[in-house]
Image: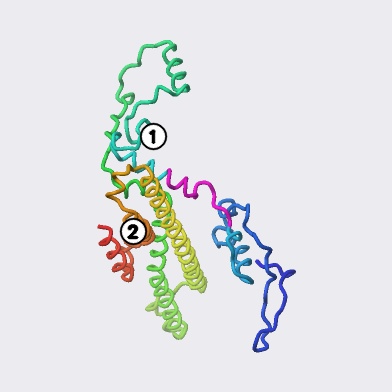
Amino acid sequence: MMSLARVNFRRGTFGVCRLKPAAAPPAFGRGKLLPEGNAPWLSKLVFQWIVPFLDVGFPRPLEKDDLWELPQAQLTASTTDAAETHFYSRCEPEKRPRFMQGKRTESDDLGLSLSSTKEDTNALEKATEPHYPKPPNFPWHRKKAKRKPTYDSSLFPALHRTFRLRIWIAGILQLCGDTLKMTTPLVTKVLLTWLTKSYVYHHLTDEQKASGQFAKLQGIGFGIGLAIALFAMQEVASLMTNHYFMTTQATGILVRTGIIGNIFRKYLRISGRARLEHSVGQIMTMISTDATMLGLTYQSHIPICSFVFIPDAPYLPYIVSIATDLI
């Protein structure tokens, strides 16, 4: 947290003494990488890694040089390359750009380029290797037939393939957090029932207790355990919900970045005749509206999966309107 050595006391307008940390030097984040990736797991869990940045923005306005630099995987070029590769792998080879028509992807059967020296060397080594008779064709030796590539030119599967780890992590966090919130009243009901029965049993006479009509309840450790369980459930649900929002917000920004980067690349590659059909205004509308709505969709689509478990009614009209606009 903030160091007490650089914290001074300043008397406010109404004579109330308040803390005011010393202003950080300019260019706080210049040349520094975002510390989230290398932070300890406990710092990631409670968002401690962002505290130095908050200390900079508390005493003075933030500037451009105060921001940390993003890692290579989150830069615009890397995000655009990944989205572009996964999208064109779902397109037919003749519909791909020229620089990707000879590129081998995981979802097609494109041949290797003969211009690669490394590939030629490997082929020559394989050709000179001695050939041995093949083993018997036992059932467990048979290779499964490769699936035919699917050329549907679909954007959503390509984006899911690019950001599937973030999407599924956010979905699991949301599902677990909502489940904990839903089961908290059930645990509270068990605790209140135990308190009521304990109160009644405590006021019974010795004859009534000895009659056996009232069963002996759990001890005080049972109630303490339920109270600790309620506290833990609330804390874990809060952490999961906050991490879910952070993950979905970052995913939406990365999706928007990848879409905008690919729109610019496509516009720079099209011919002059094609630019007459796609005006600058149309391109700017795609960037300012469509890419933004697509990013918001990825920021808000995860709650749809939790409708089965938690009735998140406020999200539904917003998401339906976004889906309607995209369709």
Q: What amino acid is found at the position of numbered circle 2 in the picture?
A: Thr
Q: Say left or right for 274 vs 61.
A: left
- Magenta residues (range): 68-81
Q: How crowded is mark 2: few (under 14 residues within 10 Å), some or many (20 or more)?
A: few
Res 99 label: 1
- Of 40 and 225, which appears nearest the observer? 40
Q: In which quarter of the image is residue 303?
A: bottom left
Return the x and y of residue 82 as percentages of the image width and height: 42, 44
Q: Which residue is located at x 36 percent, y 34 percent?
A: 98
Q: What amino acid is found at the position of numbered circle 1 in the picture?
A: Phe
Looking at the picture, the colour scheme in use is rainbow
- The residue identified by callout 2 is 285
- Of 151 and 280, which appears nearest the observer? 280
- Split into 4 quadrants, where in the image is the C terminus? bottom left
Q: What element carries label 2?
A: helix
Is residue 76 one of those drawn in magenta? Answer: yes
